[in-house]
Image: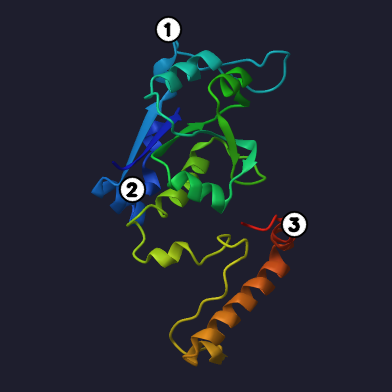
Amino acid sequence: MGFKASILTLYPDMFPGALGHSMSGRAIERGDVEINAINIRDFAEGKHRNVDDTPSGGGAGMVLRADVLARGIDSLPDDNRPRLLMSPRGKPLTQSRVRELSEGDGVVIVCGRFEGVDQRVIDGRNLEEVSIGDYILSGGEPAAFIVLDAIVRLLPGVMGNAESGEFESFENDLLEHPHYTRPQEFEGREIPQVLLSGNHKKIDEWRKAQSQALTQERRPDLIQARNTQKPRK
């Protein structure tokens, strides 16, 4: 059984989009991944099939209705897949959370729109709010692409080299070391000699030192978080 992703969106034609190409596209073709986009508007009622309404208490924008979205969620199989709501107020997505999601049977992703989603459906349907960064998008669809791309590449058999997913940024709370390839000299810049030495112990030491230095320079918050973590048993 492949990884099954159900996406609740007002724009189902956006999917699979970029996910239909490269590694994720091949995974879809093989049946390793199933991406099913469901139109939230299909669960609206009335002549105009309204999915949103004005915010209670006043204010700008519109709010996605709880009853409409709840019917969409309830139309899905009653399984144990995590239900994610893409939201700028959500918990920041991390590589460790992505890896946890990739180890399950699939995921349900709700793509928010307008000013937000009625809190009652968030609470009533146990939606996990997830953010991909401290900025605002026009809707949750681009964020859903990012979440799914991050998950799919970690599924067994998707990456050609399984080690590619183990030695990269954030896997060990550090940024990844610099990479080099041919030619040996480019515009006066040469590949560090240690990488050409054939001494794998020294190469590993160099890469670890580079990762530490890059992380300290660009993401000191990761170093701080790493230093405050409880020792793993």
Q: Nearer the viewer, mark 2 or mark 3?
A: 3
Q: Identify the residue at image location x=54%, y=47%.
A: 97
Q: Residue furthest top?
A: 46
Front in this rendered view, residue 113 or 93: 93
Quadrant (top left/top right/bottom left/bottom right) for the C terminus: bottom right
Reading the chain from its start, which is encountered first: label 2 or label 3? 2
Which residue matches tag 3? Answer: 228
Quadrant (top left/top right/bottom left/bottom right) for the N terminus: top left
Spatial CA distance of label 2 from label 3 is 40 Å
Location of residue 115 (image quadrant): top right
Q: Which mark is residue 47?
A: 1
Front in this rendered view, residue 156 or 149: 156
Amino acid bearing label 3: Thr
Amino acid bearing label 1: Lys
Location of residue 232 (image quadrant): bottom right
Amino acid bearing label 2: Gly
Asked whether the viewer can see residue 8, the reply is yes
Eyeballing the image, is 132 above or below 230? above
Residue 202: x %, y % from top left: 56, 87
Front in this rendered view, residue 84 or 162: 162
Q: Identify the residue at image location x=44%, y=14%.
A: 44
> Which SS class for mark 2?
helix
Eyeballing the image, is 61 above or below 212? above
Residue 128: x %, y % from top left: 57, 33
Residue 223: x %, y % from top left: 71, 63
Q: Which mark is residue 33?
A: none
Which residue matches tag 2? Answer: 20
Q: Identify the residue at image location x=58%, y=24%.
A: 122
Eyeballing the image, is 156 above or below 108? below
Crowding near the residue tagged with mark 3, few <14, some 14–19, many ≥20 C-alpha atoms within 10 Å: few
> Which SS class for mark 1?
loop
